[in-house]
Image (tube, helix red, strand yellow):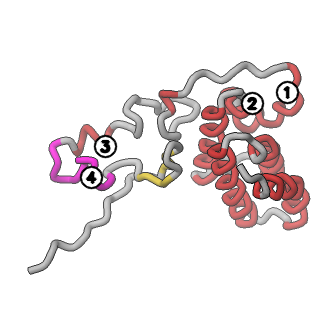
């Protein structure tokens, strides 16, 4: 009598954004992927990360299709001063991705920082320094020509505002740090492209 009740899929971790489609996907056991509990593929499918290859040791682990990304360019002498704070907070690989000429590396780095901020990976870092480091990244990525980099940056900005208010950072300090981003956002939102 009637169709069986809908069972929502179980998720073994936080949702992962699919950069190509800009939507949230489950990390394991999604609808229609043959990985249901009764499926013979269930255990082998759940054990592999999204995208196929094992990327757990990669600096961008958790970002979809990380195995398809190329290597970031070395940092040029012209960006060394700007990169200093980022190197100490996020490491060389992610910093090189932020300054890369390839939009997909810039996007992947912003997504990774968002994932790590959400997972409280930076909990031991100085809150003020982390705030200024993320704002430095957003100053580069909000005006980016790639729409996907901008969308990922907007997600990071939203999370940044939420997290730093939760951490108890003084509103005035946060406002002063984030204020330079407002003009960039207005310019970007007024861009017809």
Looking at the image, is mark 3 or mark 1 nearer the viewer?
Answer: 1
Residue 43 image point, x, y percent: 24, 42
Give the mark nearer the N terminus: 4 vs 3: 4
Describe the element under mark 2 as helix, strand or loop.
loop
The N terminus sits in image quarter: bottom left
83 left or right, relative to 63: right
Residue 164 among magenta residues: no
Residue 118 image point, x, y percent: 60, 54
Q: Would you say the residues marked 2 and 1 are in contact, meaning their CB atoms lie under 8 Å apart?
A: yes
Q: Image height check: is 170 above or below 127?
A: below
Q: Which residue is mark 2?
A: 99
Describe the element under mark 1 as helix, strand or loop.
helix
Give the mark nearer the N terminus: 2 vs 1: 1
- Kindly identify which numbered label has been placed on residue 79: 1
57 left or right, relative to 9: right
Residue 57 image point, x, y percent: 50, 29
Instruction: Say few, some or many: other residues with alpha carbon within 10 Å of mark 2 (under 14 / 14 to 19 / 20 or more).
Output: many
- Kindly identify which numbered label has been placed on residue 32: 4
The region drawn magenta spans: 30-40
Q: Which residue is mark 3?
A: 46
Describe the element under mark 4 as helix, strand or loop.
loop
Q: Residue furthest left?
A: 1
Query: Where is residue 103, by image quadrant?
Result: top right
């Amino acid at each position: 009598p009637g169709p069986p009740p809908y069972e929502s899929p179980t998720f073994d971790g936080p949702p992962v954004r699919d950069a190509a489609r800009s939507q949230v996907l489950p990390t394991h056991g999604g609808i229609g992927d043959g990985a249901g509990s009764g499926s013979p593929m269930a255990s082998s499918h759940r054990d592999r990360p999204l995208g196929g290859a094992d990327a757990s040791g990669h600096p961008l682990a958790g970002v979809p299709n990380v195995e398809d990304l190329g290597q970031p360019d070395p940092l040029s002498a012209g960006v060394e001063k700007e990169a200093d704070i980022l190197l100490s907070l996020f490491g060389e690989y992610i910093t090189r991705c932020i300054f890369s000429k390839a939009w997909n590396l810039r996007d992947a780095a912003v997504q990774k920082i968002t994932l790590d901020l959400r997972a409280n990976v930076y909990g031991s870092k100085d809150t003020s320094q982390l705030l200024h480091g993320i704002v430095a990244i957003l100053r580069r990525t909000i005006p980016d020509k790639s729409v996907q980099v901008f969308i990922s940056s907007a997600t990071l900005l939203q999370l940044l505002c939420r997290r730093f208010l939760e951490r108890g950072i003084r509103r005035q300090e946060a406002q002063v740090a984030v204020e330079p981003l407002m003009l960039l956002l207005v310019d970007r939102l007024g861009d017809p492209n």
